[in-house]
Image (cartoon, coloured by chain):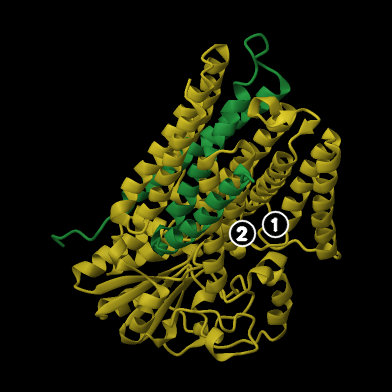
Amino acid sequence: MLSANLSAMFYLISGVLFILALRGLSSPETSRQGNFFGILGMAIAVTVTFLSIGNFSTGFVIVLIFLLIGGLIGAFIAYKIPMTAMPELVAGFHSLVGLAAVFVAIAAFLNPEAFNLGSPGNIKLGSLIEMSIGAAVGAITFSGSIIAFLKLQGIMSGSPITFKGQHPLNALILISIIVITYLLCSTQSSNLFWILLIISFLIGFLLIIPIGGADMPVVISMLNSYSGWAAAGIGFTLENTALIITGALVGSSGAILSYIMCKGMNRSFFNVILGGFGATEQSNSAENKEQRPVKSGNADDAAFLMKNASSVIIVPGYGMAVAQAQHALREMVDTLKKNDIKVSYAIHPVAGRMPGHMNVLLAEANVPYDEVFELEEINNDFANADVAFVIGANDVTNPVAKTDPQSPIYGMPVLDVEKCKSVLFVKRSLSPGYAGIDNDLFYQENTLMLFADAKKMTEDITKNL
Amino acid sequence: MEIDPFIFRLSIFILSIFIGYYVVWSVTPSLHTPLMSVTNAISSVIIVGAIIAGLAGNSDIIFNTSSIFGFLAISLAAVNIFGGFLVTQRMLAMYKKKKKDK
């Protein structure tokens, strides 16, 4: 049996290894080593926990069985999951962290002796507060992530669900969570503990339903952050350094990602969280919809334009993920490169349904990461490029964001696609994007619309090259 | 007067938030998806608490309400740990540089 001090040292080591795991992600070369540090940190934490308890009886075998079941399921999912489903997977995983936090809090509440927290009905005040926070945040993470998962999977409509009195109701529930936590700490009543959990589940659900599909990058990052704070809350309860460090790391990581995503849309965090972006603006665009002339073309025209170009910039978006067009796209690019055409990719921060979504898909299709650029890196190059190939992106290319102060997306950083000599825009129809506004790019002199499924169109262009 | 150990844990917590802040800002945006999956995996270190709960029952009563929640939490966290690290590894293996011979 390991002494408490020695195991605390090992937990500290695994906390440091987790920091190194995140540090590794600063570049793709060091990232694989970083992941290894993460695995090592986890292995140390789990082993130390077993050794410090020192109970290797029947219970130990049962723990291993449950560990193995979960591990096998996790490994199976990790190998089977297609890269396009990554946002759903991450949302699903967040819900599991949340639920695990809730379960650990319940276990600690029912059997505080096991954690040295006092006895049932007489739990140390500090521990009870920490436990309640961990459980409440965990429950919010769980139900919120379930909604995010259902929206991303398409099982639940991606459009915002709003109703009258939504915000007062949410505010009321949040206040009651605080009141119940206070009462729970003064009375130690287990009924209050269960009520706290139930209303926390409820508020997680209510917080996410008004947020629309394309705001999911913010939601997923936010839930990522919550899962971290939940872990930290439990870490305080268990007086475990590894959990506290990890919780803080994950919490701030998710918060930073949400901030980056909000900035990519030029919206405040509260604006996104209060929801209903798409719902409020859609009516507006329907009114002033006038027929404007559009130039449309076919794969042959597109191939002709690209063949005569010397540089092409590709702008992928969520539509590419939906159409699973990343492999077809890379084949097209290979053909272009054979003709000595310079090709690069431009990625908007909020392209796709989660941070970095497009980069993973392109990496999956064997696109080297040094051909893929962020908005600030590539935006000046559009003016010198011959062709911009927009595949599955929409709002992030809309020049209205720079020109029309009345527009709901005014001020959002956009890719300067319209500065290219010619723009090829692959899209199924002229329907507006998520923000519910018309894209001025469609009607520009130098834009050629390619109305087709992204994958099929890309394949056809390759044939014609 | 002695300092409450809580203060030490709080110090670790606050300092870790700052470490997280600087470390995450240095993560390249193209790796933001692996960042999310790996943070997912490491936050499942909560399994530590689940194991303590699961092993708390004595050998006569292995299954009581508390330990059952512990066992379930072990499985949930294990899905995340294995799933999270493996899917991160799978993603990171795909990030390749341009081949020199091209």
The C terminus of chain A, quarter of image: bottom left
Q: Is residue A82 visible?
A: yes
What secondary structure is marked by label 2? helix
Percent across and percent down for residue A139 are: 70, 44
Drawn side of residue A343 relative to residue A256, left or right: left
Residue A100 placement: quadrant: top right
The residue at 76%/52% (across/down) is A203
Residue B20 badge: none
Residue closer to the observer: A336 or A106: A106
Determine the colour of chain B.
Answer: green
Q: Is residue A456 visible?
A: no
Q: What's the amino acid at mark 1?
A: Ile
The residue at 31%/59% (across/down) is A367
Label the yellow chain with its letter: A
Q: Chain of mark 1?
A: A
Residue closer to the observer: A422 or A134: A134
What secondary structure is marked by label 1? helix
Percent across and percent down for residue A46 are: 48, 30
Q: Are marks 1 and 2 in contact (CB under 8 Å)?
A: yes
Residue A219 badge: 2
Residue B54 placement: quadrant: top right
